[in-house]
Image: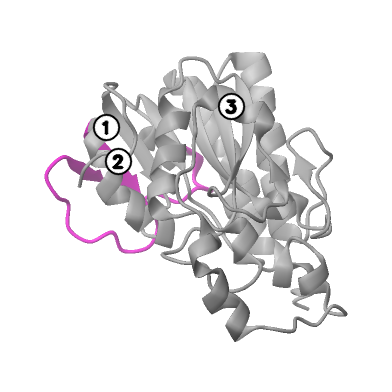
Amino acid sequence: MPSCHPTSIRFQRLLLTGAAGGLGRELRSRLKAYCTTLRLSDIADLGAEATGEEVRPARLEDASAMHALLEGVDAVVHLGGVSTEQPWGPILQANIVGAYNLYEAARKNGVKRVVFASSNHVTGFYRQDEVVGTDDPARPDGLYGVSKAFGEDLSRFYFDRYGIETVCLRIGSSFPEPRNRRMLATWMSYDDLERLVVASLTAPVVGHSIIYGMGDNTTTWWDNTKARHIGYRPQDSSERFRAKVEAADPHPDLTDPAVLYQGGPFVRTGPFE
């Protein structure tokens, strides 16, 4: 697969956690162009190890397993963890304890850059008639969003204290095409996802940065102005899908919180007990 991101930088070993998930599977094939060895981790089945791959299953809540996972790694793309609204228990273990274990393992192994899959759900309780910047306060739309806000704060601490650089990607909706009206604003193509991740890995200096993972969409709720130093320039827009999406949902219910708030259905998911 040809590279979507023009760079001559090549890593010796990259780690991709959450490699069995939807975005992980997509990046598994794409990140190989940028490294000699791609180390893959998840608790779900990762299949057979291909040339240039190391398959290393590990549980995020297992500190010793995480320490071993980060040995000899140049940088981490951390997609691992719970990725939907769930009861507190699984979120606590994978996204809170797991994030801490990842950063502690990075510190002890001397890993100096992490690309952290945060989420647009960190700011999901802003309305769809607002534009949010990366300096605006978090307004999580659920426990999942709370866990990602924690991850952003944790990664800032590890930068300030230990110099581990992180780009927090508040990923919108990355699919082959937008599935509903909300995704006209939040959609990001797989090619743009690759551009975003590789820019985050290869920008000379990132410090602690937050950037929304979105395409070059006409409708948008997020202002990425302060993240231009990353070098991410999305090239794909949801606009070519607009007629199809609007025809499927011509009259959205404006009394539905999922229509009013940026987080969509997450704002009304749960409680679970």
Q: Secondary structure at mark 2?
A: helix
Task: Residue at 45% x, 63% y: name it.
Answer: 175
Q: Residue 61 in magenta?
A: yes
In the foreground, 252 or 126:
252
Range drawn in magenta: 36-63
Q: Is residue 130 visible?
A: yes
Query: Reading the chain from its start, which is encountered first: label 3 or label 1?
Result: 1
User: Mark 1: which amino acid?
Assistant: Tyr
Report the residue marked by disc 3. 228
User: Mark 2: which amino acid?
Assistant: Leu
What's the mark number on residue 34? 1
Q: Nearer the viewer's eye, disc 3 or disc 1?
A: 3
Query: Reading the chain from its start, which is encountered first: label 2 or label 3?
Result: 2
In the foreground, 126 or 15:
126
User: Mark 3: which amino acid?
Assistant: Arg
Report the residue marked by disc 2. 31
Q: Position of residue 123 (x, y in %)?
A: 76, 50
Q: CA distance from mark 2 to mark 3?
A: 22 Å
Left/right placement of residue 6 relative to residue 114 reads left
Q: Nearer the viewer's eye, disc 2 or disc 3?
A: 3
Q: CA distance from mark 1 to mark 2?
A: 6 Å
Q: Report if the CB atoms under discs 1 and 2 are less than 8 Å apart.
A: yes
Q: Secondary structure at mark 1?
A: helix
